[in-house]
Structure formats: structure tokens, C-alpha cells
Image (cartoon, grey):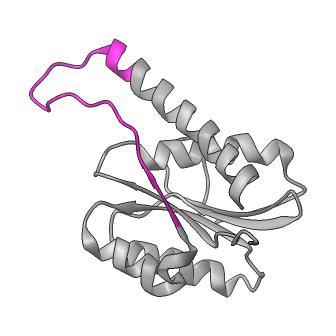
Amino acid sequence: MPTMKMKIIALRGEINSGKTRTLNKLIKKIIPLSSNLHRCPTDTDYDNEKVDRWVVLEYEGRTIAIITAGDGEKVLEKNFNEIQDYNKQIDLYICPTHSREGTIHYVENMFGKKFVLWVRKLDIWRPVEDLEDSRVDLLQNEYNERQAFDLLNIINIFC
């Protein structure tokens, strides 16, 4: 039985779980391996992992679009529309979704449930009332880095 290629990888997680930072780390891992890169027209500080952006790049013979903003359905829709206006055939999309139903339904309705590979965002958190702790920040950064590497493996194996 032939394997079905995924059309979208959706990184699903809570608000402030590190989806944007993880996807920005993924972008940084793919860029050196990419033959062509097109950035969001409003992207001014590429190294800032907190900035929401989208990129379209060529990787391993596929055109991949990565969107880092996705805590709201309207935000996802805006970014997908901008990429569609770019007029490039996209083989694989990677985007974040919130754990609430709006973004999940948007992705499933846009691509069809059988073409979505859901990946749960790994995260470490602390209650808001706790003081800043650099050790927790380091752990969060390590989790984001590790999950970006895992996403790259998912792209290589399943897509």
C-alpha cells in the first residue's frame, strides 16, 4: 500500500507554549539546506525567534511554506492568503494551531483531515506568579530546539 504524503504539519499547543520559537528554530535549520528562500514582506529581524513570520523555501525537491503565527483563526487565514498570493505551488505547509477548535477546524477544512499530521507542542511552563528563573528559560529553549529538530525529521521521513 503506497504511503500518502502529508500536505500540512500542524504544531498544536497552548498560547505561549513556544510554537513560534520552535517554528523559527525549524526555519533556521532548513535555510542552510534550502536552495531558495522567500520571506514574508514584513519580516525585518530574521534572527528574532519571537517574531511571527512566514517563509517559502525549496527543500529536498519540495516547496515548503512555514507559518509561525497561529493562535487565532483570522491570523492563520491571513498568512495562508498571503502565501497563496505569492503564486507558488506549495507541496507542504507547516503551521501552528491553538488547542482551541477555531484554528483546528480551519486547518482541517482547508486541507481535509486525512492530509493533516498533528504534532503536539512539547513545553515546560511555570505559573505566572512565579519569579523569572533562567534555568526554566534554558529548558524551554532546549525543548524548542529539540522539537524543531524532530519536525525536520518528520519532514524528511513522512513528507
Residue 147 position within the rendered picture, expressed as x and y whole percent measured from the top left: 53, 38
Q: Which residues are magenta?
A: 117-137
Residue 31: x and y in percent read 78, 47
**Quarter of the image that includes the N terminus:** bottom right
Residue at 20% across / 28% down in the picture? 126
Residue found 56% across the figure and 32% down from its top: 145
Which secondary structure is most common in the magenta stretch?
A: loop
User: Residue 9: percent from the left, percent from the top?
Assistant: 56, 62
Is residue 65 shown in magenta? no
- Specify whether 152 is left or right of 79: right
Q: Residue furthest left?
A: 129
Answer left or right for 59 relative to 146. right
Q: Nearer the viewer, residue 110 or 21?
A: 110
Looking at the rendering, which quadrant does residue 75 occupy?
A: bottom left
The residue depicted at 49 percent of the width and 50 percent of the height is: 51
Q: What residue occupies the far front of the structure in this picture?
A: 1
Examine the image and state in which quarter residue 39 appears: bottom right
What's the residue at 68%, 45% (across, down)?
A: 152
| Position of residue 91 measured from the top left corner of the image (x, y, whole percent) | 74, 73
Q: Is residue 13 left or right of residue 125?
A: right
